[in-house]
Image (cartoon, rainbow, N blue to C red):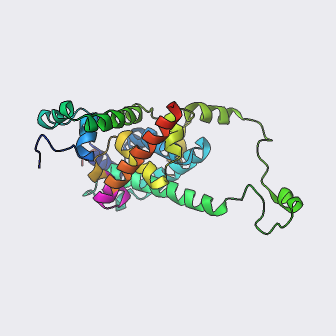
Amino acid sequence: MSAASDQQVVAWAKQGHEAAFRELVRRYERPIFSLLYRMVRDRALAEDLAQETFIKVLNGIKSYRPEFKFSSWIFKIANNAAIDHLRKKSLDTLSLDGSPSAETPEQMRATSLQLGGQGETPLDEVESRELGTAIEKAIARLRPEYRSCILLRHVEGYSYEEIAESLELPLGTVKTYIHRARNELRVYLEDRRE
Amino acid sequence: MNHPEMHLTNDEIELWSLGLLGAQRAFHLSDCSLCRDIADRERKVILELVQLPRFAASAGFADRVMAKVKVPTPSGDFTA
């Protein structure tokens, strides 16, 4: 089965063959998890989002339209999950300086977010080892839309057209995002080296 | 449009960085220090990106997914 095309494996999955479902997970587990991990920079959360993506895709396999590439479909669902999470997180973000309604320094201190008191867990150490290089830190600074485009282009090797289909963006927008993302990465990396 | 004296476009610089630009346009880089400088810096970033590793989820990921997937009753052999 490993030599079969995605379309062929999806057809077998639609017929109800469990081995075909497992084959799709095997093929896309690393690419999907890697994209999500670099998008949210939290292993446990990336794994939850990856699991959610596969469950949605595999339980909805009958609605898959073969005129689109399977990879475009699954990356679209994964990227949407990451973007939704990041948007929700930005709405939930607390100010480090305390509540906006605090008027005195005491009130600001009392309502400010306390960081650094928990110590580093083994998972934190893994994350900092995996995502601690200069290029990973530079990617983390990009806008999420730029981040997914640049990862799909240069880590997963997809064409501009495939990325446009996957992320439902105009081709020109994808080119602009990738070009700007590379410029930002270059400036960040060059600044660090100076 | 592909006149050898014309500066390389962003797309062409990316193709060159990936070793995919045609010889005629790539030749422009030997004469144009401006494009050469941009292309060299662009290539460094692209090379760092293409060498990034893929990460693996924790052990048992596929089993955890499959436990929540409803596989339909098989209908036929492995035929598309």
Residue A104 on image: x %, y %: 86, 64
Q: Give the residue furthest to the bottom.
A: A101
Q: Position of residue B38 (x, y in %)?
A: 32, 38
Q: Is residue B35 left or right of residue A136?
A: left
Q: Is residue A170 magenta?
A: yes
In reply to whether residue A45 is colored magenta, the answer given is no
Q: How many marks?
A: 0
- Residue furthest to the right: A106
Query: Residue B60 at what x, y percent from top left?
Result: 55, 37
**On the rendered structure, is B6 left or right of A60?**
left
Q: Between residues A171 and A34, which one lies in front from this camera angle?
A: A171
Q: Which residues are magenta?
A: A163-173
Task: Decide which of A41, A53 is in the foreground and name it.
Answer: A41
Q: Is residue A52 visible?
A: yes
Q: Position of residue A37 (x, y in %)?
A: 53, 43
Residue B72 is at least partly visible in this image = no
Dominant SS of magenta comes to helix
Residue at screen point 72% across, 35% down: A121
Residue drawn at x 36%, y 40% as measured from the top left: A154
Which residue lies at the image location 24% right of the left edge and 35% below the top edge? Answer: B16
The one of A171 and A97 positioned closer to us in this rendering = A97
Looking at the image, which is closer to me, A143 or B58? A143
Up the image or down, A159 lies above or below A89; here it is above
Q: Quadrant of residue A92?
A: bottom right
